[in-house]
Image (spheres, rainbow, N blue to C red):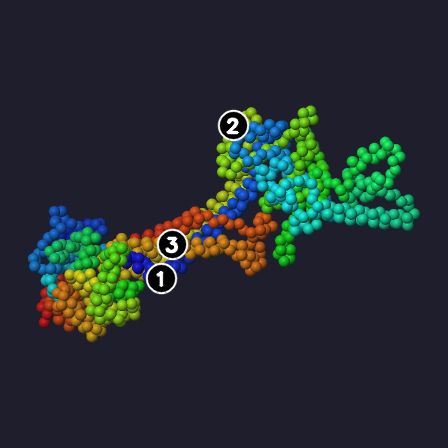
Amino acid sequence: MYKLLLCWRYLRTRYIALASIISVTLGVATLIVVNSVMDGFTVEMHHRLNDVLSDIVFEGRGLNGFPDPEWHKEEIRKVLGDDLKGITATVVVPAMFNLTVQGESMMQHGSLIGIDTQSYGTVSDFPQYLLHAKNREQLSFALRDEGYDDRLPSSGWNWRRKRITLERDYLRQMQEAERLRREALGEPVAMNTPPAAETPVTEAAPVTEAAPETAGPVDPFQRKRQAAAEEHVFDEMKQQHPGVVLGIGIASHRYRDADKEVKDIFYCRPGDDIQISFPTAGQPQIVADNFTVVDFYESKMSEYDHTFAFVPLDHLQEMRGMVDPLTGVPSVTQIQIRLHDGVDLEAAQQKLYDRFPPQQFGYSIRTWQQLQGPLLQAVQMETTLLNILLFLIIAVAGFGILATFFMIVVEKTRDIGVLKSLGASSRGVMTIFLTYGFSLGIVGSGVGIVIGLLFVVYINTIAAGLEWVTGRPVFDPTVYYFQQIPTVIEPFTVGWIALGSVCVAIVASVLPALRAARLHPVEALRYE
Amino acid sequence: MNKPQELERNVVAHRRRKNGGAPVQKKGQSQRIDGPHGSSYLSTRDLVKSYYKGKIEIPVLRGVDLNVVQGEFTTIVGQSGSGKSTLLHLLGVLDAPDSGEVYFDGRQIDNLPASGRELLRNRTFGMIFQFYHLLPELTTLENVLAPCMIRESVWGYWRRRRQYKQRAEALLERVGLSHRLRHRPCELSGGEMQRAAIARALIQSPQLLLADEPTGNLDENTGQEIFSLLRSLNTEQQLTIVMVTHDRKIACQTDRVVQLVEGRVVEKQPS
């Protein structure tokens, strides 16, 4: 009983001891904050990666792919049975994107992915990262009129028509000026030679402005020829090239303006045309084609947003020569598989390897974790290292407690003698100081937990405050594409941290407690 | 002192140190031995105790034989360094002798195991000191209750807390401190602190009170008051008291005065 009473009184009267556990408190708080933020990043990243990547990727070796995806899908369905949630075939090729920005050509490189609009949404959360609300419901590679994003108020068909009208007006004005100039010089006027650089998009198919109805039905053959020509004439105002969904990082640049506001500059927008070059299958040759941007893809994973572009699968297969001319059977480079929640991915992977043995087929079958292994491992290693370093801080704090406790024991020498002369056992005296250390640990880690949890809960407010005070961005959304710092509080981790720090406090008080217990009562009573 | 004797004593002292402070019990020695002076309550036989400063042995007690009769108020007087306090510590089993024995109520107590000595100090002996030795973190009442708390477990103390508190309050009233129950020692005067210490020594109803210069740090009047208190405890409750003092005036008022000269007893009758 006296142990508890004395312990309580020491706790309330010895503020120096409380000062010695401030480092424990800070260590605990920092550990909780760091773990919560790292867990937050990890969980968010897992979430995003898994949503973007599908669960298992079934891949051929080269860029030529493997033929007959339907047969493969059927086999995979048979192997996985009810575990299968979604399956789709894709073609992935490296590609160069050529964007025309203010009359200048800009090259970006990335991965071009041919997808099937119907089934691609079943293997990943791809549609939910699109900007247009209707595309999020059902992806279409047809350009929509408008309604993309607040950042892009003018886009879609409306923007396309407006832009083309302006471009044509400009062209006409230029031609008029040229005509006038030549007239003034007395040179013959040559019409209908539009400068190529002004209208790159129309270069491939020159615009014919002749209205078909003005020509009378003179020659039936001529009429037929005209109708055929009309079919091949590409009218930018009414038609689009094959659609492409561009990763938002390819088409934009994020920066902070003078007021520290995060802004995006778009190099192109839905309704604009771009060129994409990529290698063909077989003997690799570079082919290029025009595509019309129909939407942007924003997964907020910086790497993916800067790399991926999606086009219709059949168009890509056709352009790359992946369709067998005799049988009409197409090839693909990947089959992406999504399983139901809770299914063991590695077991499913093993089943697929059993069906398609590597010696025989040469497919690589990998789970998303394996595909992103180095990244996930790097984050894991960072967390471990930080934990070790921060726990060392608490261990250092342990030495502070040790020193303070030694001082307290020396200061209390006579009281220890008195207690022993009143019949207290050595073990009892030792218990007083161990309990004291334990309660200091509890107080230290308790306060640390409270501070840490408060910090985690209000971390974004605190980051904003720090930003305001220091004038430097603490958390930069231009780097992470997260609007806020993600945090996850794991009760298990918090428990371990608290337990660890209490243990450090107890261990640090063992030596002083032993010293107190071994004091000889007579010598302790004589101590001045 | 001849060589073999000295050697034997050193060996005993060495064994005792190895034994964690507990005296070495010789083989064949029974736990309960009647004292050499049959009727005496507390007695010592040939107590020897030395201190070591480095390797130099400083003998303090050189064979003390003392007998205290039950109900007697004995004072031990002597010059500084004559070993009065050391003798009192040996009597109160706070320390163990190099050789010789201490008997209490017909039973040898200097060779008891640590737990036995703790129990003895807690329940059978009450101790008061020159510098009061109250615990500064506790109030007067809590200081008086400390021996009960030490003796009992948390649950046991909690169950009997009313009973203990009543007793402590009664004792504090007896020593004239009923108005100081909630004060800390630093808020009390020297005399009040010594009264609180006496109440603390009495809380477990001890059979023997050991007082180490209880008046040494007080002025004459207060010292006399404290002595009167002890004297009345002795006469009213037949409490056996052994007191060490420097004050000859006070020593003269007790039943028996034992003088220590260079670590040996020279008996004196109070004049």
Q: Position of residue A108 (x, y in %)?
A: 67, 42
How far apart in space, not on screen, are marks 2 and 3 (Cα)? 55 Å
Q: Position of residue A179 (x, y in %)?
A: 87, 47
What kind of element bears circle 2? helix
Q: Quadrant of the C terminus of chain B?
A: bottom left
Residue topped by disc 1: A12
Badge 2 density bin: few <14, some 14–19, many ≥20, Cα 10 Å: few
Identify residue type, mark 3. Answer: Gly
Kindly state the secondary structure of the residue where label 1 is placed.
Answer: helix
Q: Residue at x 38, y 54 (%)?
A: A441
The image quadrant where one finds the N terminus of chain B is: bottom left
Residue found farthest to the bottom: B221
- In this view, which residue lies farthest toward the left? B38
Distance Cα–Cα, label 1 vs label 2: 68 Å
**Pointer 3 local density, CA inside 10 Å: few below 14, some 14–19, many at least 20:** many
Q: Can residue A518 be seen in the rendering of this structure?
A: no
Q: Amino acid at mark 2?
A: Asp
Q: Nearer the viewer, residue B267 or A128?
A: A128
Q: Is residue A420 left or right of residue A218?
A: left
Residue matched to label 3:
A441
- In the displayed structure, does residue A284 sit left or right of residue A402? right
Which residue has dot 2 on it?
A354
| Label 3–label 1 contact, CB within 8 A | no
Q: Which mark is residue B38?
A: none
Q: Chain of mark 3?
A: A
Task: Say which label, 3 or 1, has the lower sequence index.
Answer: 1
* Up/down of A60 relative to A511, above or below: above
Mark 1, chain letter?
A
- Secondary structure under badge 3? helix
Residue A330 percent across, percent down from the top left: 65, 29
- Determine the CA span between mark 3 and mark 1: 14 Å
